[in-house]
Amino acid sequence: MRKVKIAVLVSGGGTNLQALIDSQKNGVIKNGEIVLVVSNKETAFALERAKKAKVKTRVVTKTGKSREEFESDLIKVLRDDRIELVVLAGFMVILSERFTSTFKDRIINVHPSLIPSFCGEGFYGLKVHEKALEYGVKVTGATVHFVNEIPDGGKIIMQKPVEVLEGDTPEILQERVMKQAEWIILPLATEKVCSDILKGEM
Ligand code: GAR
């Protein structure tokens, strides 16, 4: 059966990557295959998770490069493996229009809030949860969306709400949002996009 070739781009711990790997094993993701994991950080624990799952890894760092050079290197690595879908899973780099239009409608991202709240430039990782708690929202969540040139501005694919509880710290809230939302909707949205890509070929 033909499967969409997926690359997962990471920068850190890689719990979302793990959720994708597990979902491929248990059949939630069936129309796609993770063939490559790319990190912009050599020390990202996500790379260990990929190696353990026997997925090919590449490191592309930005150090000493212009944004254009960095993105060209990234595009080359993705083209070398004929990647058809790019999944950003905790990839802490904002991509330019040149990059996003190269993979138009073929890049998705998971963001730890209900977009359009707490998103855009400067809102990433734990900061998102700090801002949500600061504002005092009672409900937050996660969003999976297509990536275009506007940070967190592409079309929404899936969202899931998560309750904010009395006494939450940013760390506690982050963990709940991951468990109850991100690790569920990222694999589901990935499968949906893969299946839509294959349907488009029929
Ligand atoms: C996740 O919460 C992800 O949604 C967030 O970073 C974390 C990465 O964790 N991404 C962003 O904030 C992107 N704007 P992980 O490395 O364990 O998957």
Image (cartoon, rainbow, N blue to C red):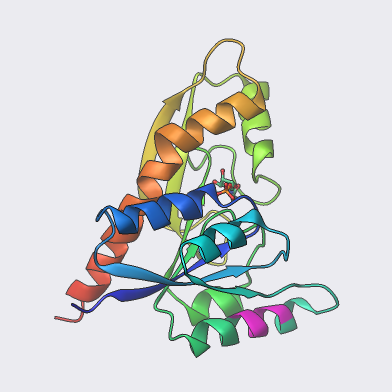
* Residue 61 pos. (x, y %): 74, 72
Q: Which residue: 53% across, 56% down?
A: 89
Quarter of the image that includes the N terminus: bottom left
Q: Quadrant of residue 32?
A: bottom left
Q: Which residue: 60% across, 59% down?
A: 48
Q: Main secondary structure of the magenta part?
A: helix
Quarter of the image that includes the C terminus: bottom left
Q: Quadrant of residue 27?
A: bottom left
Of residue 121 and residue 46, the one placed in the foreground of this image is 46
Q: Which residue: 58% across, 77% down?
A: 99
Number of marks in the rendered image: 0
Q: Decide if residue 2 is in sight here.
A: yes
Query: 158 left or right of 124?
Result: left
Query: 152 left or right of 146?
Result: right
Check if residue 133 falls in the magenta segment.
Answer: no
| Residue farthest toward the top in the current orientation of the protein | 166
* Residue 11 pos. (x, y %): 65, 58
Q: Quadrant of residue 132?
A: top right
Of residue 186 and residue 22, the one placed in the foreground of this image is 22
Q: Decide if residue 156 is in sight here.
A: no
Q: Is residue 45 above or below residue 54?
A: above
Query: 163 left or right of 33?
Result: right
| Residue farthest toward the right in the current orientation of the protein | 64
Q: Which residue: 47% across, 52% down?
A: 18
Of residue 175 and residue 104, the one placed in the foreground of this image is 175
Q: Is residue 56 above or below residue 29?
A: below
Q: Magenta stretch?
A: 70-74
Q: Is residue 178 above or below residue 14?
A: above
